[in-house]
Image (spheres, rainbow, N blue to C red):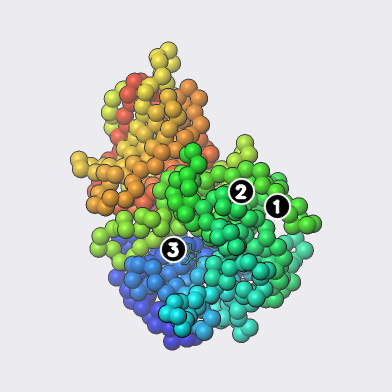
Amino acid sequence: MSQTLREARKYEEVSGKMIKPQERPVFHLSARTGWMNDPNGFSYYDGKYHIFYQYHPYDCHWGPMHWGHAVSEDLLHWEYLPAVLAPDEAYDRDGCFSGSALALPDGRHLLMYTGVLREPQTNGGIRETQVQCLAVGDGTDYEKYENNPVITAKDLPEGCSAQDFRDPKMWQTKDGTYRCVIGNRPADGSGQILLFSSYDGFAWKYEKVLVSNGDRFGKMWECPDFFRLDDQWVLLTSPQDMLPWGFEYHNGNGTLCLIGDFEEETETFTERHNQSVDYGIDFYAPQTVLTPDGRRVMIGWMQNWDTCDFRAQNISWFGQLSLPRELFLQNGRLYQRPVRELEALRRNPVRYDGLSFSGEIRLEGVRGRTVDMELSVSPKEGREIYRKFAVRFAQNDRFWTSLSFHPEDSILKIDRKFSGSRRAIIHQRRSRVNSENGRLKLRIILDRFSVEVFVNDGEQTLTAIVYTRQDADGISFYADGTVCMDLVKYDLSADE
Ligand code: FRU
């Protein structure tokens, strides 16, 4: 093991212990210490889920990238393991960027990641190159492959960028061979996803351009993932610098989902549908795993590059991963719901059925900051449709975050403007949701520092970081007009 990795392991162990459990989310994974961005190497290996992450242990800001590591049996209780990769080789000296993992038939765990190298040029500039590298391990310790890098710009057709060439996501096909998709930038300066193949996971060959952006969705496409879902195929990728289209793609850097057909013989993908993956503020660079029982589960970085200056004070970690979410297709769209394992964390159900109200109300037993709350609203029978419904949470006299819904234009808005932020950055996002006659279903999941909203049984999600002080735990409801509401609320607890 290199000195660089040994030092990182020593540092994270000491400094991670100084963070009190109550300074962390309860069931979301946060950086062990310092900075976290993308989830990496999300895989099931040796009886456990493994997740790695982009990691700069020494500081709460992005820096030379390492890979942090955690394992879990239920995707909700995570145990930190020592960091596995540090930028310590000639080909990755400036960072071990994002990548993926899979279990090899011989029982070893294979990681593929992007090595970054920045070289000063005689003209005073810097030339950056990104290459794909492997490491092999046993679930705790990993050794970089002696023949690294295994894919470089030399393997690419003319016009492909050697500088923007990153984030390999591997999988094994039915016949036992391997494929991987990698983000790249072609001559038009926007993004493309390249497909590679391998017989053994070690020797890789360029196949083709799987999908071209053609300047439609942002510029460079980062962190691709490609998989079968039901009878379709899904490409997830996180484009940089997107322009909004109607109510889609408002996040600058957000995640795009392309759904289509994939002809496996010729490896040809035909797009049928595109959509945003999340309609809130903080969600980027997700990665999926296929669980042993056949579910496709996605986890993302619960941040937005543009709002990283919105941060907690006096906490020495930055960055959390989202709830793991089960993916499925319905009505030609990507749907998400929290992994069913979350239900085991539910405690103390509180129920209200057919509650009619106007104005602002609070409900006995409905408060808290680690909460799973399902509610459906509709107009009261025989009355005209209400004008507005809202729920406020993480609330006290001074602070709150809200979700508000206007049935007239079917707009759902998330707003954390009053959550305690002292920065002039984006705190609101409006989304058009499906609603007939003022009917809307929401599942709202709060952990100490986040909210994730699942609209209409997973048709859309809105995710946002919320750093409001923990004693602001009120929840209230508001109706302009008369709303009829069914509600069930649980506390979420990670204690056994
Ligand atoms: C996405 C990303 C990846 C890259 C990593 C670097 O958030 O920019 O493309 O591998 O972060 O930390």
Cα separation, mark 2 vs mark 3, equals: 23 Å
| Residue 183 visible in the displayed image | no
Q: Residue furthest right?
A: 265
- For residue 192, side relative to residue 350 (left or right): right
Q: Residue at x 42, y 80 (%)?
A: 124
- Circle 2 residues within 10 Å: few <14, some 14–19, many ≥20: many
* Up-down relation of residue 41 to residue 325 (above or below): below
- Circle 1 residues within 10 Å: few <14, some 14–19, many ≥20: some
Pointer 1: what residue?
269
Helix, strand or loop at mark 2: strand
Cα separation, mark 1 vs mark 2, equals: 10 Å
Towards the viewer: 323 or 65:
65
Q: Assign the C terminus to one quadrant of the image.
A: bottom left
Q: Residue at x 70, y 52 (%)?
A: 269
| Residue 246 visible in the displayed image | yes
> In the figure, residue 312 lies in which quadrant?
bottom left
> In the figure, residue 3 lies in which quadrant?
bottom left
Q: Residue at x 36, y 27 (%)?
A: 388
